[in-house]
Image: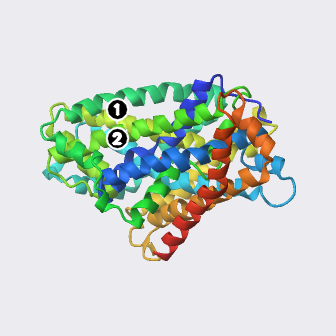
Amino acid sequence: MASDQWTSRIGFILAAAGSAIGLGTVWRLPYVAGTEGGGAFFLIFLILLLTLGSTLLLAEFVLGRRTQEGAIRAYKNVASNGNWHWIGILGMVTAFLLLSFYSVVGGWIIAYLVRSFSGQVTSPPGGDYSALFETITANPWEVGIAHLAFMVMTILVVQRGIRKGIEKATVYMMPALFILFAVLVVRSLTLDGAWEGVVFFLQPDLSAVSGQTLLTALGQAFFSLSLGVSVMVTYSSYLGKSENLPRSAWSVVYLTILIAFMAGLVIFPSVFAFDLEPDEGPMLIFTILPAVFGEITFGSIFFTLFMILMLFATLTSAFSLVEIVVAPLIRGKEEQKRVKMTWTVGLLIFVLGIPSNLSFGLLSDWHIFGDIFFNQLDFLVSNILLPIGALLISLFVPWKMSKTDLQEELLRGSNRGNSFFSMWLFTIRYIVPIAIVVVFISMLAG
Ligand code: PFF
């Protein structure tokens, strides 16, 4: 049983939304939408988030709050015999691997931020933004120190625990993130020629939708809500018994959607206003955005704001990934072990991240199955471990927990009735697992 708890429902919602809103929403979603046809992809992503995503999110909440336990014990509590707790161990391994390369991008953000203070980013030598990106990422010292700095920031927060660490940091960072985004949306929408970008982003061209679009959108929806890792199980285990779970889940989904909208409204209008291509891929925000900001008045200030916002989004996701690994390891000895264990886990994740970091410099010629280490690890985590985790959770919760427990936990403190419960149960029992299996098989086949 967890000894630390969120002080309020808002603290929990902001921390859970903080985990959800990260590089996946602010960085990956826009470039994937850019390459997958814009508005149509975004529309499908929204529908999947509101239906299957929110259903699985609620399942993780129900399990965590019911058992009040983290990744391993939550499963053991419900099914004491069998090997179900391996779902939790899988989640811990996934979080470990995921953060090892996620933190590399966190490091790039810090490196860009430091350089942006001197205006170097928005006006690089010769106006070559891609070369600037390559110079930064290929310098092992610059990105190495920035990577370490990112992990140390994460550790310093998580070592203080739920209430004094994660909740306290997120209740400042998340509102700051919304405000910074709002400023940037206004700036971007008032650029000449911004409208074309809004149309690209919001007008669905359904002829651009293929089976592949659906599959990518489902993966993106689960990734965006941090599902399949037991992160949401862990966070909800610190939630008071009287809180309304469906409402909390909706709040997290809505906040994620809001930020996804804002990210699109910052990026696409700027890209179109400057006649750049929206399908630039992963480098969209590191090469295209500096180019855009380089052209506008006070651009370097706006770019710095954007990097601060990205840093906050990335850190609040990193907190959850460290917490899910640390929580089971310190269970029952929270006071004595938290600080030491957080440093150990955090620094190990940093060390494991070094090959990913060097993939863009010293190790760029080292290919595994035809691609650099960073990309292969991303593939393993995002396309294999996360869907397997999501599938196992979507089977475990509705089939292993008793129907009465599920119903009681889901509806406690909520004004929703039995029909809501039945619909949720049907979706999590049948639709979610089938959808995951279909995505998975098509992906492996493709
Ligand atoms: N949801 C985060 C994002 O969109 O960047 C990524 C993530 C965090 C995935 C934590 C999974 C997780 F457990």
**Residue that label 2 marks:** 263
Q: Distance from label 1 to label 2 (Cα)?
A: 8 Å
On-image quarter of the C terminus:
bottom left
View extreme (right): residue: 81
Pick whichever, 149 or 100, lies toward us. Answer: 100
* Label located before the other in sequence (1 or 2): 1
User: In the figure, is residue 425 to the left or right of 224?
Assistant: right
User: In the figure, is residue 326 to the left or right of 267?
Assistant: right
Report x, y in % for residue 185: 28, 33
**Residue that label 1 marks:** 181
Q: Is residue 18 above or below residue 91?
A: above
Q: Quadrant of residue 54?
A: top right
On-image quarter of the N terminus:
top right
Report x, y in % for residue 435: 56, 61
Q: Quadrant of residue 416?
A: top right
Q: Is residue 34 visible?
A: yes
Q: Pointers 1 and 2 in contact (CB under 8 A)?
A: yes
Mark 1 neighbour density, 10 Å: few (under 14) some (14–19) many (20 or more): many
Report x, y in % for residue 410: 70, 37
The amino acid on which the numbered mark 1 sits, given as a three-letter code, is Phe
Q: How many marks?
A: 2
Label 1 within 8 A of ligand 1 by Cβ: no
User: In the figure, is residue 116 to the left or right of 351?
Assistant: left
Q: Which mark is residue 154?
A: none
Q: Quadrant of residue 277?
A: bottom left
Q: Residue at image x 49%, y 70%? A: 443
Report x, y in % for residue 295: 14, 40
The amino acid on which the numbered mark 2 sits, given as a three-letter code, is Ala
